[in-house]
Structure formats: C-alpha cells, structure tokens
Amino acid sequence: MSTGYIIVQQSGPLEGSVNISGAKNAVLVIMASLILTRGRSILRNVPAIADVYEMIEILKSLGAKIQFDSQSNVVEVDTTQLNPGILNQDAVKKFRASLLIFGPLLTQFKDVKVAMPGGDAIGVRPLDYHIKNFKKLGADVWQDENFLYGKAYNLQAQRLVLDYPSVGATENLLMALTLVEGESWIVNAALEPEVLDLIVVLQKMGADIEICPPAMIKIKGVQNLKPVDHTVICDRLEAGSLLIAGAITKGDVFIPNANALEMELFLMKLGEMGHEIKIGANGQGVRLKACSSPKVVSFKTGPYPGFPTDLQALMMAAQVVAQGTCNVVETVFENRFLHVAEMNKMGAKISANGHCAQLEGTPHLIGVDVIATDIRAACALALLGFAAHGVTRVQKGVHHWKRGYETLDVKLQQLGANIILD
Ligand code: UD1
C-alpha cells in the first residue's frame, strides 16, 4: 500500500541531460481561458500532473468534451456546449488555481458561483484584489465561507490599478476584459512568463491585448474569441528544481529546453554561489556545473522578474549545503517558511522570524522524517535529502509532488538520484 512518502537517500553527483515538462502555472490558466471560446482547441506540452486532471474535471463538468493523451502531452478541449449551472463545485474546491475560471465564467455567463478552496499553508491568500476590481467593472461580487459569487450583466471598460502585481488577479481580470466592450487597462499587472503565455493564447483567440511599460496591460474588448492551437511554455520552476538538485549533489545537469531568459536572477544567484552556469544561444538550454565548495548567497523573493517565491524553499536547500551565513527574505507570501523547521530536523541551521530567515551552511545533515506543506517545500526537502546521511522520508510528499511535477522523480533517477515515491 502506498504511504504517500517521498523516500530519498544520499545521492550524487547527479549528472546528465534532462528535459522539463510544460509549465503548471501556465497550463492551468490557459485551460480556464478556453471557457471564453466555443469550438475545439488543442493544447500541447501539457504536463500530466494532478492539477491538470482536476482542471479537466472542472471543464468537463461545465460541458466541455476533453481528450488528454498523457503520452504525447496533448489535450483537446471542445467547448461548443458549456453550461455553468452544472459546475462540479467539489472539483473546484480541491485546488486554488480553479479560481481562474471565475473571470471567464463571469464575462461569458453573467451569473457565477464558484466554490472557495479555503486557506493555504503558505498564507491566507485573500481574494480582495479580484473582488475589488470586478466590482469596479460594474459586477456585483461577494463571498461567504464556501463560495465566491458574481453577477455581471453590464461590465464596463475601466482603468484598474492593482494594489500588488498579483498573478491570479491579473489573469482573472484580463480574461474577463477580453470580452468587455471598450478600452481597459490593468496597471501594476503581474507579467510572469506564465501570464505572458496566457496573453499569447488570448491574442491567438483574437483578443486585442497590448503590454505597455511599466507593467500595464491594455485590453480592447472584442465580440467573441475563437479556439486555439497552442504549445504551452516549459516549466521554469521545474528547471530551477533540477538545477538545485545538481547544485546540492555537486553534479553537472543540463536542461536543453529550459529558457534562461525566464530565470535570470535565479541563475545569477547560483553563479554567485560559485556554480558554473552555461546558457545556450538565445537563452535556450541551461547547464549547471556545481562548484565543489559553494558559498551561500542572500536573496529576496519578489514579483517577476524578481526572485520567484516558488524557488525560495529550493534555493534555501542549496544554501544549507554551502559555506557561510546569509539572509533570505520572503516578500510574496506571509507564511512561506514552513520548510525551515523541517530542514532544521535534518541538521540545517536556519532561524526564521516573520519574513526573514538567517541561515548558516553546514555539511552535517541527517536523513529523518519530515513533513511537506506545499509542492515546492516537498521538492526542497527531498532534494536536501540527497546531501543527508541516511534515509529522508518526506511525509505528505507524494500528494504535493504529483500536483506540480510530471515524473520529476523519474528524471532525477535518470540523473543518478536515489529517490522513490512510495
Ligand atoms: C500564483 C502561482 C503561485 C505563485 C504565485 C506568486 C498559479 C496557479 N500559482 O499564485 O505558484 O507562488 O502566483 O508568484 O499561477 N493577494 C492578496 N489579495 C488578492 C490576491 C493576492 O492579498 O486578491 C496576495 C497573496 O496573498 C500573496 C500575493 O498577493 O501574498 C501574491 O499572490 P498571487 O500573485 O495572486 O498568487 P497566485 O496567483 O495565487
């Protein structure tokens, strides 16, 4: 019987070449955006991960006909007949990115009720930016403990200013505005590579969208949008995870299909640690040759192109096995240091206080039982296990791992890692 543990033993150096899968944070919102169209769309480079299967359930419950070939990573979605009244709220509740159906449903069907996924280990994750700005567009939007409701019979084009460049709020509002007559703006928009991939998809559908400096999106509403054929971008967070695995094990890892231009600050910090980073022509392909005695670096997370919060726990694992002391500042989520106590169980020397952590590198790590609180913490703890004496078992790890990574365990095994999902 499966225990749900990721089981890891000391490994390395990890060596070899491995390709990454399609980006989770791009594919989920792109699938949600298909609600804006009628007809048959094809998405390629779709990772076979649990969150994608959940999004398929949601779209099916709305009436979409879907075929997913997980071998070729192609999904066909036929949205000819959609009916929001039959939405499967239990499927919506299961994961947070399902909230991204709200904007497309509101602009298309005017009267929407979407289940709330509840709080999250890494922070409260309120919806105030979404709600406030849909209200500015003229919608009636409110929430209770269980649902987010929206009624919008006459959305009006507006200039919207976000308090913070929230990825989800930018995406939800952007998708809705593609069908709102007139010219709208999102000021202080998130411009993560995954948001840019969504914009490419919406433009292929026929949306009139322009990105303007500094961090603004201009949208001119159109009457309707058509289906698309699109290849989803590759997952920079999976690329980052594999490079960290190389760094922790003093290995040599090459990722031919990683886009270095989407992870420049992260790569610069790895270089500052002493690791050799080689980048292919036009940023395509990244190789990390690990330094045998890396130095720690301080870093601070922030919205793109800042240091990604989703690579904070992983980068911290790389610091744990380096020399010296450094500071890590998390500015995106208020509670994203839950992995610190778990890393300390393994012998790491980290003290966290609010948004800041101080870390002292150590070569003495031991494999113990640790608990994963989210996808990236699960991965960070597993990768740190490669540098620990004995067996590291990451409890609740498999659940998180399968939500966010497509066969990363197999890819790591191919590089020489001792890791299994139990
Ligand atoms: C997305 C990503 C997630 C990533 C995060 C930040 C997906 C599916 N998930 O999450 O992996 O870690 O971006 O890069 O793409 N906030 C509010 N009110 C709101 C909305 C957000 O206060 O209405 C706060 C959040 O609590 C958080 C910060 O803004 O502190 C950033 O959140 P946001 O960018 O919205 O993250 P997500 O879209 O949920």
Image: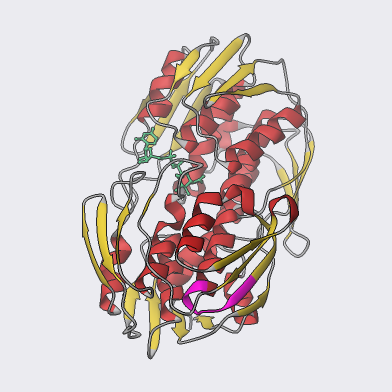
Name the residue rendered at 74%, 25% in the picture.
225
Answer whether residue 128 is magenta in the image.
no
Which quarter of the frame holds ligand 1?
top left
List x then y, in percent, for residue 27. Answer: 63, 47
Residue drawn at x 39%, y 61% is 313
* Residue extending furthest toward the bottom: 390
Q: Please give the range of residues in magenta.
A: 247-253
Residue 162 picture quarter: top left
Image: 59 above or below 309: above
* Apparent side of residue 214 relative to residue 45 in the rendered image (left or right): left
- Which residue is at 40% across, 60% downward? 374
Looking at the picture, how far across and down is residue 101, in whole percent?
A: 55, 35
Q: Compared to 203, does 236 lie above or below?
A: below
Instruction: Give the percent coordinates (x, y) of residue 135.
Output: 42, 17
Residue 251: x and y in percent read: 56, 79
Q: Nearer the viewer, residue 119 or 351?
A: 351
Q: Quadrant of residue 37?
A: top right
Judge whether residue 82 can be spotted in this image. Answer: no
- Where is 143 relative to 233, above or below? above
In-image side of 389 versus 230 (left or right): left
Closest to the observer: 89 or 19? 19
